[in-house]
Amino acid sequence: MTRNWRKLCSLLLAAAMVGTILSGCGSEMEQGADTAEPSQTAGAQQEKDTAGDTGDSASAASLSFWGWIPYNNVIEPMTAAFQEENADIDVDVQIMDWGAYWDKLTLDLANGEGPDVFAMNLDNYEKYKDYMEPLDGLAAQVIGDDWKTLFNEKMLESTYVDEDLKIFPVDFGGQWYVFYNKTLLGELGQSVPNGYQAFADYAKAVENDTIPMIFGGKEALNVAYLYLWLVNNQNPGIVSKAAAGEASFEDEAFLKGFEDLQKMMDDGVIPKNSFGIDPTTDADSLFKERKSPMILTGAWQAGAYLAGTQLADSKIAKDEIGVFAMPTPINDNPYVVGSIDHGWAINKNSKNKEAAMKLVAEWAAGDAAQIWLEELYGIPCAAGVTLDTANLPSQEAKDTIGVISDTLSDQLAGPRSTGNAAVDNKTGEVVQAFVQGMMDAKDATAQMQQAYESSK
């Protein structure tokens, strides 16, 4: 998805946000939910062989689902909503940590196994596309020829890659946003910083008393996405152009991105110890424990933090939480990056594809989608899902959540990823080496370009 990104995404988001509000998913998925252990919820807990031909009937089927989402506390009502109309289809669910999920999915799919249905985002599409069933024909067969009316037209259009639809989209999300604890800032004698220099001044003022801002820099891909965002703020859309061969990863914007990252570290905006913080567990826990007034993450945390869906037992449950788009050293009104962040795919080796299509349709566009998005507060891809900001628990949340939708609509530079797993991985590797002082920017960008050329 590299062509005309800003134009396309501006159109699809503008259309989607009539009566809606947002958040999204991300690589690190700092969800704060109980996802450390697998969750077996609805249906029979039975072994099944997923390899084989498409079944002739969807009756008395047993489906398996794997994901890093939805949160365990909403998977049961989502599955119950599905089984109200499909009592003859059992669903066995496993929700895993982000890293464990992708490791297990990769191994099992490569062996011709894996679940019938699994969670997917566009960042990982290229790596897994050959394991996913094309959905157009199956959707028409199971749902009907008018199945596309279930979705916002532009959202659905943005999910097609090379004219194939292999993911039923759920929500659109982006990075980078700062969720802040206004209550804790006040206790520190600080206000919400407005612009990069004010942020740098704030970081220096509080560094002896608290962590200025939490960033999960231990994961290489998370670091890669942060750096690529800085590059896109130097030259909006250039990351997608380089990934399409229309620019080089050695162009000036990529070198300048390293300069901006270095300045953010020098200014204490991104503390150097950030690169030892795991984004999926540590970052979220530190924020909830009031170890810092701020956390740099993705819009998918709007439900958890602004709506408070994951804060009930935390130390910040009664604090005023807000959000703003992270400024860069060159841009106080920054571009953001984003794409379809959550969706459901069907294993091409599933024996129960018709039943699986019924499940992904309900979870993407039915009552179950409403349940999930009310937890997540993501921009819905379904035509029938709307969210009400009046339900947010604090005035600060109500006053600021619109920043996410506004920036994703008007200031979107493209996806957060190159769309090329080899380049993304190499980017994370060289950026971490740069942070550790083991590589300079020219060598780093040269290695990124080489990774791109080798992947063609």
Image (spheres, helix red, strand yellow):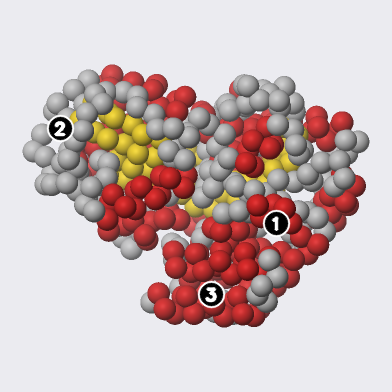
- Residue 49: where, in percent of width, then height? 17, 40
Q: Which residue is drawn at the image coordinates 78% and 44% (left, top)?
A: 211
Q: Find residue 58 and name its label.
A: 2
Residue hosting label 1: 334
Please identify the quarter of the rendering in which residue 283 is found.
Answer: top right
Circle 3 SS class = helix
**Would residue 234 be seen by someone viewing this image from the given angle?**
no
Q: For the N terminus, which image quadrant?
A: bottom left
Of 81 and 146, which appears nearest the observer?
81
- Residue 391: where, in percent of width, then height? 61, 22
- Residue 274: where, in percent of width, then height? 69, 52
Inspect the image, locate mark 1, and give the three-letter code of the amino acid beneath it: Pro
Q: Which residue is drawn at the image coordinates 28% and 51% (left, top)?
A: 109
Residue hosting label 3: 448
Of 180 and 392, which appears nearest the observer?
180
| 304 w.r.t. 131: above or below | above
Q: Which residue is drawn at the image coordinates 31% and 52% (left, top)?
A: 107
